[in-house]
Structures are given as C-alpha cells and as structure tokens.
Image: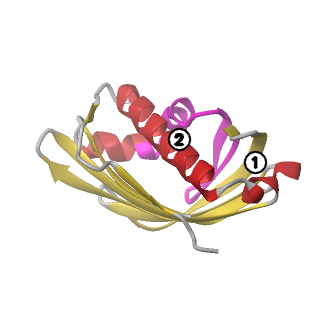
C-alpha cells in the first residue's frame, strides 16, 4: 500500500519541525498512541492501538530516522508487530515547505501488512490508513496551536495489485 498526501498547517516551519521531533507532541497526536519514547537521536519506539475493520490490535514498533535535514526533510523506516493481528513495515518520507498561511507538509509512505490485517480487503486498509493520517494531522496542528488549511486532494492511497 502507498499513501501520499500534503497538509497545510497554520504554523511556522520551525514549529512544525520541532513538533514532528517531540515525542510528547507526537504521543498526543498519533491516534491510539499508548506509549512513545525516544531511545536514541534517530530512533523512536511506540505502542499504538489500531482498529482496522474487524481487527483491533496493539502494535509495538520502532521508527528509525535517516537523511535528516533539519526543518526541511527526513526519511523514516518503521516496523511493528501486533501479535496475532499481524505486522506492518515500510518507509516514509516527509518534506516541509514554506507556503502561504503556514507550512506545507508533503509525505509519502510505502507499507506492507501481513497476518490477519493482511487478509482484510485493500480498500478497507486504504481508507483506514487515510483516516489515521487525517486524524493525526488534525490533532498535530491543534497541538501546535494552529489548524489544518484545506487543500484540494489531501491524500491519495494507492492499493497494490496482488
């Protein structure tokens, strides 16, 4: 599955960058986040409860940052396991750009999902991923004291043809 999108957040780039690197802010913004901690400068571990279709699972995972250019961009690789529900792993890229009204956050994610979650229809997983991303950015913008400014075609989800 691939997820691409852009969000315009009514906050300066420096504030958005700090927020994206602050585990306290992230913990409050990530839907279902139960625990989050920075274990190294480039590594974050978290526990998140997700409900996708009929499957509800607590995922434990890690996120590794790379190619970090402060206040501009970074790449991330992630992996998590949810017990019998399955696993998720993938990579993501985030870029910040100055825009009228705030900061444009462009992101792309490629993920593979296995186990019970992998058996759920692609459309259900895609719509759940889009909702999780939208909910994150709404909560994240509020954490920064700003808001999301509507853009046409916020997120695109591409399903794998398998």
Q: Position of residue 23 (x, y in %)?
A: 54, 39
Residue at the farthest bottom position: 162
Secondary structure beneath label 2: helix
In the figure, is residue 60 to the left or right of 28? right
In the figure, is residue 156 to the left or right of 89? left
Would you place residue 69 above or below residue 15 in this image?
below
Q: Position of residue 29 (x, y in %)?
A: 50, 33
Membership of 126 in magenta stretch: no
Residue at the farthest left position: 100
Residue 36: quarter of image: top right
- Residue sitting at 29 percent across and 50 percent down? 153
Instruction: Single out the mark in the foreground, 2 or 1.
Output: 2
Q: Which residue is mark 2?
A: 132
Q: Nearer the viewer, residue 112 or 16?
A: 112
- Residue sitting at 36 percent across and 54 percent down? 5
Q: Position of residue 154 (x, y in %)?
A: 32, 48
Secondary structure beneath label 1: strand
Q: Position of residue 69 (x, y in %)?
A: 35, 65
Q: Which residue is mark 1?
A: 60
Say few, some or many: other residues with alpha carbon within 10 Å of mark 2 (under 14 / 14 to 19 / 20 or more): some
Membership of 42 in magenta stretch: yes
**In the rendered view, how is the structure colored?**
secondary structure
Q: Quadrant of the N terminus?
A: bottom right
In the figure, is residue 96 to the left or right of 116? left
- Residue sitting at 76 percent across and 58 percent down? 119
Instruction: Say if mark 2 contacts mark 1, CB within 8 Å.
Output: no
Would you place residue 22 above or below residue 115 in this image?
above
Would you place residue 66 above or below residue 54 in this image?
below
- Residue sitting at 41 percent across and 40 percent down? 19
Say few, some or many: other residues with alpha carbon within 10 Å of mark 1 (under 14 / 14 to 19 / 20 or more): some
In the figure, is residue 146 to the left or right of 122? left
Q: Which residues are magenta?
A: 20-48
């Amino acid at each position: 599955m691939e997820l691409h999108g852009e969000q315009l957040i009514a906050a300066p780039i420096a504030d958005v960058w700090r927020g994206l690197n602050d585990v306290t802010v992230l913990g409050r913004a990530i839907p279902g986040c139960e625990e989050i901690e920075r274990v190294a400068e480039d590594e974050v571990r978290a526990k998140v409860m997700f409900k996708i279709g009929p499957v509800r699972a607590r995922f434990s995972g890690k996120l590794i940052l790379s190619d970090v250019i402060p206040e501009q961009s970074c790449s991330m690789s992630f992996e998590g396991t949810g017990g019998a529900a399955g696993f998720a792993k993938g990579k993501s890229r985030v870029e910040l750009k100055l825009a009228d009204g705030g900061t444009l956050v462009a992101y792309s994610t490629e993920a593979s999902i296995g186990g019970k979650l992998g058996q759920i229809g692609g459309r259900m997983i895609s719509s759940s991923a889009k909702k999780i991303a939208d909910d994150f950015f709404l909560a994240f913008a509020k954490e920064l004291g700003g808001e999301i400014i509507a853009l046409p075609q916020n997120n695109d989800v591409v399903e794998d043809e398998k």
